[in-house]
Amino acid sequence: MVVLGIETSCDETAASIVEHKNGKKKVLSNILYSQFKEHKKYGGVVPEIAFREHVKLIDKIIIKALNKGKKKFKDIDLIAATGGPGLHGGLLIGTTVAKSISLSINKPFVPINHLEGHILSPRIEYNLSFPFLVLLVTGGHTMLIIAHKIGKYEILGLTLDDALGEAFDKVAKLLNIGFPGGPQIEKYAKKGVPNIKFAQPLINSNDCNFSFSGLKTSVLKKVSEKKNSIKFKEDVCASFQYTILNILEKKSELALKIFKKKFPTKKKNFVIVGGVASNLFLRKNFNKFAKKNNCKLFVPNKSFCTDNAAMIAWTAMEKYNKKKNNNLNFQPLPNWQI
Ligand code: KG4
Ligand code: ZN
């Protein structure tokens, strides 16, 4: 089976070909255009600009994905596109293009939940069996989830306000160090010393929920108190990352306890997914965390952490077969939950 996947839920225009052949699933191409340049001067994603860029690029990206995967439209068995959650304009472009291809080649279209794409993304590279614990950290969501099986996800906790990626982006914006914030904070933090104490909202709440808006305000207070030298910015970034690590570790420990209670005899498989999971400081420290907590950690390659179409095609391949009913009446779901 050959699946064409399309991802346009935010500011990445992406297409991918995934193939299931001789019992093996493989990503044949994973093409992506990140609209950083277009949104940079606004310090965040502007939905209307994202929409226009998707319109401009989507057909070229799909053709590139087909060429790189050495496939033609006639080889495709299933077309998948992100159906939500995300920005309505982008979702509309991806799903409409996918439906059009579906109609013209007479193969089924399936909408995929973007969060499910992130959750299953480690299975692209790793032989990861269910159940597993997921720390999902993106620009729009922050959650601890138990993935019981394909299609069954139990949310243990989530952010009550800002998502973690959003907090990275907002802190970078108030430090005026560029967009997207995550990679910039990571860069500045490398030279900084974590010598500033920031608030850690909900750290002692004894549940798996998060809150990052208070942390952002706490950073804002320090920034407006001090002169903004490069050295100061580096220390803020290092301290911010350190605080984040502390919060994520504390909440993950609680979630692992719940996981262990539910599945006393199962391996403690723990995955971190989403754009923030590409942060090397977090990746390195979570390796230590996994050893300490006696669990097996899986973090996707960076290219599968940030938004990509391979995870969308992959999820379609895991969930459906060639005979899947067509979903031509599907309308984008900007707030689609898992
Ligand atoms: O998963 P993703 O690409 O898109 C969403 O589904 O939202 O996540 C994007 C988020 C952005 O907020 C971005 O700043 C953050 O991931 N991010 C990072 C890093 N790279 C991307 N955060 C921290 N460190 C990074 N290296
Ligand atoms: Zn995402």
Image (tube, helix red, strand yellow):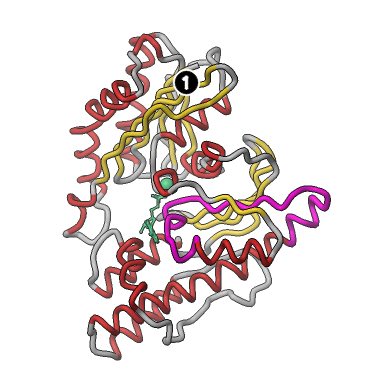
Q: Residue at x 24, y 81 (%)?
A: 230
Number of other residues with Cα within 10 Å of mark 1, as a class: few under 14, some 14 to 19, many 20 or more: few
Q: How many marks?
A: 1
Res. 131 image quadrant: top right
Q: Which residue is mark 1?
A: 327
- Residue 14 in percent (x, y) is at 32, 35
326 to 336, vertically: above or below: above
- Residue 108 in percent (x, y) is at 46, 16
Q: Residue at x 18, y 51 (%)?
A: 37
- In magenta, the rendered stretch is 257-283
302 to 125, vertically: above or below: below
Amino acid type of disc 1?
Answer: Asn
Whether residue 219 sits left or right of residue 228 in the image: it is right
* Residue 270 on the magenta segment: yes
Whether residue 101 sits left or right of residue 271 in the image: it is left
* Residue 268 on the magenta segment: yes
Q: Residue at x 31, y 78 (%)?
A: 234
Observer-nearest of 164 and 61: 61
Classify mark 1: helix, strand or loop. loop
Whether residue 201 sits left or right of residue 103 in the image: it is right
Q: Residue at x 29, y 59 (%)?
A: 180
222 to 210, vertically: above or below: below
Whether residue 134 sits left or right of residue 99 in the image: it is right
Res. 240 image quadrant: bottom left
Observer-nearest of 322 and 47: 322
Res. 67 image quadrant: top left
- Residue 99 in percent (x, y) is at 37, 20
